[in-house]
Structures are given as structure tokens and as C-alpha cells.
Image (cartoon, grey):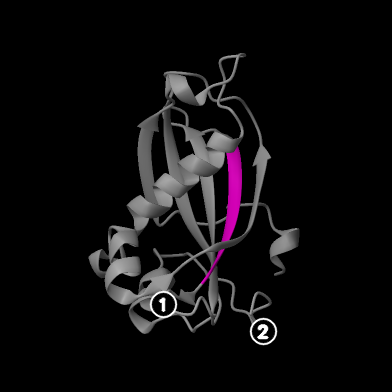
Amino acid sequence: MDLEKKQLAEGHAVHTMRMYVHFGDVDHAGILYYPKLFHYAHLAYEDFLRKLPSWSLPSCFNLQGVGTPVVSAEASFHGPLAHGEKIAIEVVVERVGQRSFTLGFRLCDDASMSVRARIRVIHAIVSQATFQSIPIPDELREFLEKKPTGAQVIPLANDEIE
């Protein structure tokens, strides 16, 4: 199935991070300011990678010599997130290519788990020394491909980011 025809962040969550919407993250209307959606997704991304300590972002950059720059990001909004609201951010591994991977994020009201926003982020894999594209290292690939029961990663014949 083509990712563009698929709803953002569709599939089984592999990680969930909970937090509150902070005062400094809302706009004059008292709801989450839209760029903060991407910041919250990035916080959940970092939290997810901490499950594999050798590939947490500090380890990724400082020990592995690998970067994971964002090459594409998009969001869809389904309802407001208000200051003080407890939210759950679910991480979905949508696709693992040869040199890039796609993560989806669902920002939900923690009590009802109703989806308020969906985000898709594509990360390339690059050498920190040269900033050239490199294959996803085996340990990171195995971590990303590890799925809960019933989940599925979309295989691609060609990794269009490469």
C-alpha cells in the first residue's frame, strides 16, 4: 500500500509517551500552537529511541557517528489540545527502507485516546562525518522492524528517499 494513500500514523503503536500540554506551547486561543506538534513528536521519537540505549540520539550522534535528519514531515489535525490536558503520543513505525525510515505519531487525549493530530516524519540515515546517505545499521534496523503481534511494516522495493 502506498503511504500517500494511507492515513498518517496508521497502525499499531510500538511506543507511547505521556505528557501534559504546557502553557508555553499554546497560542492565544489556549490550544497547542501547531509547530509544537512536531516538537512533541520529536520528544516521543527521542523517548522511543531510549528503549535501545546504543541508539538513543546522544549515542547515535556521539558514539555511532550516525545522524537521522528529517527529510519530510506532515501533519493532519483532528481536534484541539488544550493547556493542561494530559496527552498520549503513540509512535508507529510505518516503513523501514534501506537508507531511511518513516515514523507516524498520534497525539491523543490520554483519557479517551481520541486522536487529535497525526504526524508522519521521514528520517534519512547519514554519516555524521560526511553527511552522506548510508544504509540503516543492522541493530537499528532490527529495533525498528520489531513489531507487536498483528502489526505490519510496509516493505518497499525501492526506497524513494535514497
Residue 120 is a magenta residue: yes
Query: Relative to residue 4, is residue 129 depicted above or below?
Result: below
Of all residues, the one furthest to the front in this rendering is 129
Mark 1 to mark 2 CA distance (whole Å): 16 Å
What residue is at 55 percent from the left and 73 percent from the top? 100
Report the residue that reaches farthest toward the left: 53
The amino acid beneath tag 2 is: Asn
Q: Is residue 97 left or right of residue 62?
A: right
Q: Residues within 10 Å of mark 1 (few under 14, many from 20)?
A: some
Which stretch is magenta?
117-124
Residue at 47 percent across and 18 percent down: it is: 83
Residue annotated with mark 2: 158
Q: Quadrant of residue 149?
A: bottom left
Residue with the most extreme top position: 29
Q: Which residue is mark 1?
A: 141
x and y percentages locating residue 48 in the rendered image: 36, 55
